[in-house]
């Protein structure tokens, strides 16, 4: 059996109501039996009279049981037709109690037509059956919406109209055998039609309670046949058989309801056996957190994994767990989106990221139906942070491996170009050196510049590779001193003016302060600026401008390097500062370079606890903004920066088309 995990308050309320009804019914029956002992003065009634009294009492009890079993079946199956038919059995029970049915005395000379049937209550039973078999209509809906009033109406109608019809008097029409026969033929037709209709409904819907009700109502049709037969042959046997048909009618309902209940219990057992598998899958799930919330945001169920996660135990305080889960749900920030999807599609699925504890959750929510047409939300989630982390690491390794392969191919190309020049020049010098009439010095002077340039290109490339390796293992450190940042930026900018002029590019420098001392590594700042200016010259066409500006405020030193070059695409801007990355990775690109210069720039800025941003449009140029903290070393004086011309030549050595 499945343990009761979800506390069903509706079921508890219904159990209390049923218990009250049982107690009241037992008390009423006991009161009637006891009062029958003390209030019955005439204990000398004849055998026949006592038998008839017993028959009437027994028949009344059976009719009430039939009404009660119909109500119980309706409460379980929630089918409107069953409740409406139960009103017919209630009307039948009232007729038996009030003596409107089967109350005749069994004395031949006293038997008359009029005291065998009360037409007004009989018509009410017929009307109720017709409403029960008809399709949905306003009257059916009115009866179902007002169940208590409907029951009260049947009781009051049976009492009032039964009394008026049987006590005030009958018309001659009622006393005629012709009317009696015609009316019972009418009953036969109605009861038979309703019986066939209910039988067809039961077979179609595979609900055999309708078949049981069909059989019971068909007994009423047979009773009407016996009534016609009994008008001509007045005998004790015929009358007793007519009464027994009422018994059979009621017994069929009671026994049929119990049989249907037995089948329901059997099906429930099979269902519970199947549900036990799903329960074990849910409650003992080792991977997923599962819980169920009511529409009122009340925690109905939580599996063991949630309880053990928050309380290290299966036995947890549901109120505390409810409070914790509510906080978690409210912190998601996607509540409206989830509820909209649930109301529209009945389900939601998504990935939730919690930045505070660096968790990634694969979550799904689904609406489920509860008792009394109430709905709840079943939530199922799994922490996939570790899996996502592994996948990201694998993806990073793949990307890194790809970038490294591209870098090796690129650096091989970069190294091969100056090596080819070295080799070609050496071959040329070797040939010229054996000629006696040649001036070797003049020839060497002709190719010396090219040799020096390519040596510097190789040296710069090797230095960059070494530095990027130091950055990876954390060996690249800054040597901080106090320097005039304006002087460093201005000196570096002016030092490359001549290089830019070779390409007819104009460089302009501007600042809002002529002097400002901060904590920095002057060689690193020099290298940073040379790299940025080298890129600006390299990727700008002739007759363009480059602007270098320094803005100083209380918090930051802002250095802008702006060019009017080819610009950088939005996609490239996302990765331009990563290692081994170039916007153009082809070997036929317009400019030389290994793709690690900007990565080193970013590392230098990080060592200074600064930031770098890029604002660029393709074919419109770029602006690189560097922010350095406006801080200085209080215990030291500032030092004067001396520009290193060798470093300038080294950093600008890859501007091949200018220097060759």
Image: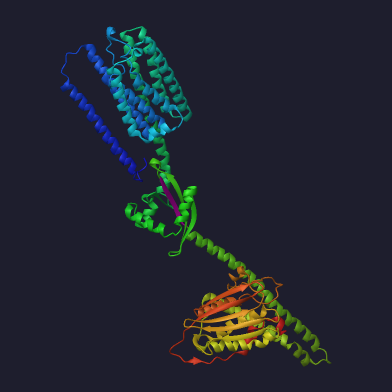
The answer to whether residue 378 is seen in the rendering is yes
Q: Quadrant of residue 410?
A: bottom right
Task: Examine the rendered structure and indicate whether residue 176 appears above or below residue 538.
Answer: above
Q: Residue at the location (39% across, 35% down)?
A: 268
Q: Quadrant of residue 242?
A: top left
Tell me, what colour scheme is on the image? Answer: rainbow
Q: Quadrant of residue 641?
A: bottom right
Is the magenta region chiefly helix, strand or loop?
A: strand
Q: Residue at the location (57% across, 91% down)?
A: 642
Task: Examine the rendered structure and indicate whether residue 48 appears above or below residue 639.
Answer: above
Q: Residue at the location (41% across, 37% down)?
A: 271
For the N terminus, give its image quadrant.
top left
Place of residue 511 in the rendered image (x, y in percent of width and height, measured from the top left): 56, 86
For the C terminus, give its image quadrant.
bottom right
Task: Examine the rendered structure and indicate whether residue 568 appears above or below residue 505.
Answer: above
Place of residue 623 in the rendered image (x, y in percent of width and height, measured from the top left): 60, 77
The answer to whether residue 312 is seen in the rendering is no
- Decide which of 339, 193 is in the foreground and name it: 193
**Left or right: 220 in relation to 603:** left
Residue located farthest toward the right when viewing the structure as drawn: 437
Instruction: State yes or no: residue 515 in magenta.
Output: no
Place of residue 105 in the rendered image (x, y in percent of width and height, measured from the top left): 27, 12
Task: Examine the rendered structure and indicate whether residue 204 appears above or below residue 8.
Answer: above
Q: How many marks?
A: 0
- Decide which of 653, 416 is in the foreground and name it: 653
**Left or right: 397 in relation to 295:** right
- Decide which of 108, 347 is in the foreground and name it: 108
Place of residue 354 in the rendered image (x, y in percent of width and height, measured from the top left): 45, 62
Residue span colored magenta: 375-383
């Amino acid at each position: 059996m499945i343990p009761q995990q979800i506390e069903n308050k509706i079921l508890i309320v219904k159990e209390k109501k049923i218990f009250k009804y049982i107690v009241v019914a037992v008390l009423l029956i006991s009161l009637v039996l006891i009062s029958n002992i003390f209030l019955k003065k005439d204990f000398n009634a004849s055998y026949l009279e006592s038998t008839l009294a017993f028959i009437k009492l027994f028949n009344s009890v059976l009719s009430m049981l039939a009404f009660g079993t119909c109500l119980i079946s309706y409460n379980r199956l929630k089918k409107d037709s069953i409740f409406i038919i139960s009103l017919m059995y209630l009307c039948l029970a009232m007729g038996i109690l009030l003596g409107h049915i089967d109350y005749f005395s069994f004395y031949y000379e006293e038997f008359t037509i009029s005291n065998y049937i009360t037409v007004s209550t009989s018509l009410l039973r017929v009307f109720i059956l017709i409403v029960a078999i008809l399709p949905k209509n306003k009257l059916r809906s009115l009866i179902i919406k007002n169940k208590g009033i409907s029951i009260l109406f049947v009781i009051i109608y049976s009492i009032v109209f039964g009394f008026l019809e049987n006590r005030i008097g009958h018309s001659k029409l009622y006393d005629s055998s012709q009317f009696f026969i015609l009316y019972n033929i009418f009953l036969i037709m109605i009861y038979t039609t309703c019986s066939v209709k209910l039988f067809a409904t039961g077979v179609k819907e595979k609900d055999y309670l309708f078949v049981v009700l069909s059989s019971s109502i068909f007994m009423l049709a047979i009773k009407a046949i016996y009534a016609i037969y009994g008008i001509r042959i007045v005998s004790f046997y015929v009358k007793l058989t007519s009464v027994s048909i009422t018994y059979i009618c009621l017994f069929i309902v009671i026994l049929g309801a119990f049989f249907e209940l037995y089948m329901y219990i059997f099906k429930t057992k099979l269902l519970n056996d199947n549900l036990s598998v799903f329960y074990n899958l849910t409650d003992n799930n080792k991977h997923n957190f599962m819980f169920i919330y009511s529409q009122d945001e009340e925690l109905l169920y939580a599996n063991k994994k949630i309880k053990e996660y928050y309380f290290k135990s299966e036995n947890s305080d549901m109120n505390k767990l409810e409070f914790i889960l509510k906080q978690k749900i409210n912190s998601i920030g996607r509540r409206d989106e989830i509820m909209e999807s649930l109301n529209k599609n009945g389900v939601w699925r998504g990935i939730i990221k919690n930045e505070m504890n660096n968790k990634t959750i694969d979550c799904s929510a689904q609406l489920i139906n509860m008792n009394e047409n109430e709905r709840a939300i079943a939530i199922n989630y799994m922490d996939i942070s570790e899996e996502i982390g592994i996948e990201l690491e694998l993806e990073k390794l793949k990307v890194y491996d790809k970038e490294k392969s591209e870098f090796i191919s690129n650096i091989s190309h970069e190294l091969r170009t100056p090596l080819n020049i070295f080799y070609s020049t050496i071959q040329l010098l070797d040939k010229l050196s054996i000629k006696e009439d040649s001036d070797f010095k003049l020839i060497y002077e002709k190719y010396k510049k090219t040799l020096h340039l390519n040596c510097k290109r190789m040296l710069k490339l090797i230095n960059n590779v070494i530095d990027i390796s130091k950055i990876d293992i954390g060996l690249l450190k800054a040597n901080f001193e106090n320097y005039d940042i304006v002087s460093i930026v201005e000196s570096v900018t002016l030092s490359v003016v001549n290089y830019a002029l070779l390409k007819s590019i104009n460089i302009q420098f501007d600042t809002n302060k002529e002097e400002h001392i901060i904590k920095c590594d002057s060689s690193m700042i020099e290298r940073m600026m040379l790299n940025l200016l080298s890129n600006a010259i390299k990727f700008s066409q002739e007759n363009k401008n480059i602007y270098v500006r320094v803005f100083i405020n209380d918090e930051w030193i802002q250095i802008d390097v702006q060019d009017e070059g080819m610009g950088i695409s939005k996609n490239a801007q996302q990765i331009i500062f990563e290692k081994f990355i170039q916007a153009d990775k082809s070997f036929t690109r317009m400019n030389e370079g290994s793709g690690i210069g900007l990565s080193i720039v970013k590392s230098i800025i990080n060592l200074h606890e600064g930031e770098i941003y890029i604002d660029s449009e393709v074919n419109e140029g770029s602006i690189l903004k560097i922010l350095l903290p406006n801080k200085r070393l209080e215990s030291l004086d500032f030092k004067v920066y001396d520009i290193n011309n060798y470093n300038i030549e080294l950093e600008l050595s890859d501007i091949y088309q200018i220097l060759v």
